[in-house]
Structures are given as structure tokens and as C-alpha cells.
Amino acid sequence: MAYPTLASLTTLRLGGPADHVLPISDPAAWPEAVRTVGLRGEAAPVVLGHGSNVIAADAGHPGTVVVMNTRGITTTRVDDSTVAATVQAGHPLADVVQWAAAEHLAGIECLAGIPGTTGAAPVQNAGAYGQQISDTLDRVTVWDWEMGRLRTLPTEACRLRYRDSRFKADPGRWTILTATFHLTRSQPAASIVYQPLADELGVSIGSRPPVPEVTAAVLANRQRRGLLLDRHGPDVRQVGSVFLNPPVTAAQAARWSAVGCPVHTDSDGQLRASAGWLLEHIGCRPGHDVADGVRCSDNRVLTLTAHGDATATGFSEALTQLGERVRSATSVVLRPEPVAIGTWSADQPRL
Ligand SMILES: Cc1cc2nc3c(=O)[nH]c(=O)nc-3n(C[C@H](O)[C@H](O)[C@H](O)COP(=O)(O)OP(=O)(O)OC[C@H]3O[C@@H](n4cnc5c(N)ncnc54)[C@H](O)[C@@H]3O)c2cc1C
């Protein structure tokens, strides 16, 4: 039987063959999946959701790739105003946000339109418009491949930071099976903290419009800014932002904000400069070619898109080169946001 390539499992549509692909649609099938990986002599598989935040190697992966397709949301009452929603790892995060909006459950409305699965969202503490997974995540159930057992990790044990977590730091160890969020039964949404969203809604910072209005405004704003994954658009082969907003010192923040670079303080208190502005500073423009088969999206420079015969190696080289140009022009170090998976040789650019 021919297994799919990693390209067919990722939104960039890059990446070579996988030795063995194991889709998981039924949560009850998990013990069998663990047994299969063990029988193949592997310590752990590569885990994928929708592949919207990975760059898969051209050489592929010589082992098992588990694809989380499990779906389902169950709720329990915590108290009069709080509902615990436990979501299967393969359930699309965007669908969970829509479900919460329909139920008037507040806390994740600003995450509308983020592609990918709920199980992947804690991996980089996915966030947007001033909200992030860590705001509402209560716990995850995981398979710990090192200990060979099921565990429940409370949010504090997940070490969620700005686009970071212990899962991202130690990728081979964990498979997230479910994520439980504490959502607030509330007509109004959580307070609006992000100015572009306040502008979109025509309200001031701190306002609390109804949850469905916030969700709709986030989607409208993402649509306009090219932040939705349009499966039929020219920019479909992408992973969203390719660089994290980089941490900067107070001196760097003062220097670059004086010439127009947006700088913000993240939820960990770290000053961060706009990666998109820094790319524009070195001459990147929407729609520009960056390398063979790699170009800035038509909407924003921080999204690179793959075209034609692009390769994962070429895409990664493009990131390395852009990072190097920003570093030499500004002394600010960019770190890629997507995660490299599969086999990369020593002479290839490794993210
Ligand atoms: C158009 C576009 C817009 C985006 N906008 C945002 C945004 O606003 N904010 C944001 O934070 N991100 C954004 N992203 C990035 C991406 O959507 C998120 O990181 C998302 O959470 C990835 O989900 P996925 O299922 O595609 O993960 P994948 O790409 O399949 O995997 C990502 C990482 O998580 C690991 N992983 C996946 N599932 C599991 C699991 N069940 N257990 C353990 N590890 C797992 C993988 O091994 C990999 O390391 C955007 C991407 C695109 C293409």
C-alpha cells in the first residue's frame, strides 16, 4: 500500500514520503495506535493535525505519522457561570469557536478563523487579537511517549508562553488527545484588548460586545488582512506568519519604534517588534518573489507562499536568508514560527 506524502498532509504541500501514516478518527483507537508504533520499534511518532504550521522535509519521515482526526465536544457545568468544554484533539479549532459563539460562551471568540486542530493549538499557545489558548485552557490529556502512559496536565504544567509551550520544546514526547477549556456563560465577550479589533467593531478598548459579534468581526478583519486560509485562493500554500514577532531590548524598541516599527508587550511582559514591519524594512513587499517558488502573499509580507516546484529546502533557505538580512540590517533576530518535521540533512537549513 502506498502511503501519502507529507505534502498531502500539510498546507504548504511540501514534503516527501512518510513511511507509515496512521489517521486516528476514533478516540477509542488510541491504545491500538500506541501498540502499532511500539511494534514498529519507534519511540514516538510525528503527530499532525491539519499541517498548517509545519515545514515537512523533502526527504520525508522514515517512521509513523499520526494524524489526529478525532472530533467531538462534551461539556460539564463548573459553576453557575463557567462551562468546561472538553474537545477532541482533531476537532478544528475554528469550529469550536463557532460552536462557543452559538452557545454564547465567552473566552475564545478572538481565535475565530485560526486554521488547524484543537490539539495543536496548545503546542504554540495559538493566539490572535489579544486572546490566546492559555487564557481559557484548563487542562489537556496527553499520551506521554517517554513514560508510556496517559496523563492529565493542568495548564500550569503546559508551560504556555508567547507562541510556545513544553510540547513545542519537546516535540517527540507528547501527543495531546483532548483539551479542556473553561468558558464563561455570558452575553458579552471577554474585554476587547486589541486596537484593530476595537476599530473593526467600532468600540473602545475594554468594551464587551456580544460574543457572536466579536467572532464575526474577527473573521471579517482576518479576511481583509489575508489571515484566513482560502482553499481556492492563490495563497493557499502557506503556514500563516513565518516568523514570530521578535523579542527586543528596551533600547531596540525605542530605536525601531521611533522610525515606525510597531512594538508591543506580549502577555509574558516581553517587548516584541513587528516581524512584518522588519521584513518591509529590508524591502519585502506583498506579492514579491523571495526565492524560486516562494513569494510573499499578495496580502502581507509575513506570510510566505509556495508555488509550482517549490521545495521544503528552498522554503527554509528563504526563511534563513530573510532572517539573516533582517539581523544584519537591524541586529534583531527573527525566529521561524512553523515547526520543521521529518528528516533534514546537516547541510540543509534547519529551522
Ligand atoms: C492562514 C493561517 C493563519 C494562521 N493564523 C494563526 C494565528 O492567528 N495565530 C496562531 O497562533 N497561529 C496561526 N496559524 C498557525 C496554525 O494555524 C496554528 O499553529 C494551528 O494551531 C496549527 O494547527 P494544525 O492542526 O494545523 O497543526 P500542525 O501544523 O499539524 O502541527 C503543528 C505542531 O503541533 C504538533 N501537533 C499537532 N497536533 C498535535 C497533537 N494532537 N499533540 C501534540 N502535538 C501536536 C505538530 O507535531 C507540530 O509540531 C495560522 C496558519 C495559517 C495557515
Image: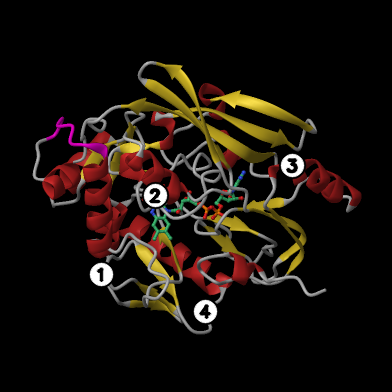
Which residue was labeled with disc 2?
244
Q: Residues within 10 Å of mark 4 (few under 14, many from 20)?
A: some
The mark lying in front, picked from 4 and 1, is 4
Evaluate whether residue 246 shows in this view: no
Amino acid on which disc 2 is placed = Leu
Q: Main secondary structure of the magenta part?
A: loop
Q: Decide which of tag 4 and tag 1 comes sooner along the chain.
A: 1
Q: Which residues are magenta?
A: 205-211
Which residue was labeled with disc 3?
28
Q: Residue at x 51, y 44 (%)?
A: 118
Q: Residues within 10 Å of mark 2 (few under 14, many from 20)?
A: some
Q: Are marks 1 and 2 in contact (CB under 8 Å)?
A: no
Q: Residue at x 29, y 64 (%)?
A: 226
SS at mark 2? loop
Which residue was labeled with disc 1?
283
* Label 2 C-beta lies within 8 Å of the nearest ligand 1 atom: no
Amino acid on which disc 1 is placed = Gly
Q: CA distance from mark 4 to mark 2?
A: 23 Å
Q: Residue at x 37, y 16 (%)?
A: 80
Q: Are marks 3 and 1 in contact (CB under 8 Å)?
A: no
Q: Could you tell me residue 91's position as x and y percent?
A: 54, 48
The mark lying in front, picked from 3 and 4, is 3
What is the quadrant of the N terminus in the image? bottom right
Q: CA distance from mark 4 to mark 1?
A: 22 Å
Which residue was labeled with disc 4?
310
Q: Decide which of tag 3 and tag 1 comes sooner along the chain.
A: 3
Outermost residue on the top side: it is: 79
- The verdict on residue 170 being magenta is no
